[in-house]
Amino acid sequence: MPTIFSKIVAREIPAEIVYQDDRVTAFKDIHPIAPVHILIVPNHEIATVNDVTPDDEQTLGHMFVVAKQVAQQLGIADSGYRLLVNCNADAGQEVFHLHMHLLGGRSLGPMLARRD
Ligand code: 5GP
């Protein structure tokens, strides 16, 4: 079964795509947690970071180049942004198609809330 993100990549279900090339697709998160919340995904399915192989290195590196471009495109390159990748249950990964969150447009606060 293709993931929901594969269906977005193939344009089988709607999403606000802000960038796409032959390796990666970037689109708006359906439930944004910041004024800018973009998901950048490899066009081919990689379930989690645990499933990454050396063959994926070019695509994964390319995701950073695209993140930089999209941040510029959306006007948050200078104000700043956060790139985040969740892996498996403790990180709260919901969609098992590796994706990088690009978050910005406001001050994002500390990376993690302390639980002291
Ligand atoms: P995760 O917790 O797996 O790192 O994040 C998954 C993200 O995908 C969530 O922020 C969620 O809002 C987003 N998402 C889930 N389903 C869809 C969808 O069908 N379309 C879009 N654009 N985003 C989705």
Image (cartoon, rainbow, N blue to C red):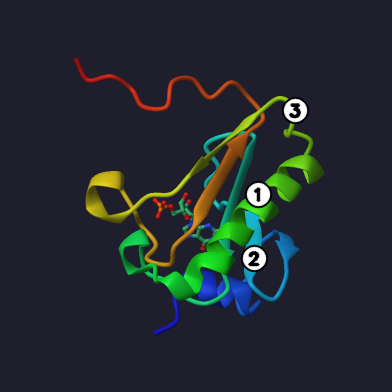
**Front: mark 1 or 2:** 1
Q: Considering only vertical position in the picture, is 95 above or below 36? A: below
Going from the N terminus, do you reach mark 3 or mark 1 first?
A: 1
The local crowd at label 2, few if under 14, some if 14 to 19, many if 20 or more residues have their Cα within 10 Å, is many
Q: Where is residue 2 in the image (x, y as percent from the top left)?
A: 45, 81
Q: Considering only vertical position in the picture, is 1 above or below 86? A: below
Residue that label 1 marks = 67
Towards the viewer: 50 or 5: 50
Q: Considering only vertical position in the picture, is 105 above or below 8? A: above
Residue that label 2 marks = 25
Q: Distance between the residues labelled 1 and 2?
A: 10 Å
Going from the N terminus, do you reach mark 1 or mark 2 first?
A: 2
Please tell me whether mark 1 sits on a helix, a strand or a loop: helix
As drawn, which residue projects farthest toward the front? 54
Query: Is 28 displayed left or right of 78 in the figure?
Result: left
Q: Where is residue 110 in the image (x, y as percent from the top left)?
A: 43, 21
Q: Which amino acid does label 1 sit on?
A: Ala
Task: Say which mark, if any, is on residue 99.
Answer: none
Towards the viewer: 32 or 79: 79
Residue 75 sits in which quadrant? top right
Q: Position of residue 80 (x, y in %)?
A: 66, 28
As drawn, which residue projects farthest toward the left? 116
Q: Considering only vertical position in the picture, is 65 above or below 52? A: above
State the residue at coordinates (58%, 74%): 43
Residue 48 sits in which quadrant? bottom left
Residue that label 3 marks = 78
Q: In which quarter of the image is the N terminus?
A: bottom left
Q: What residue type is labelled 2?
A: Thr
Please tell me whether mark 2 sits on a helix, a strand or a loop: strand
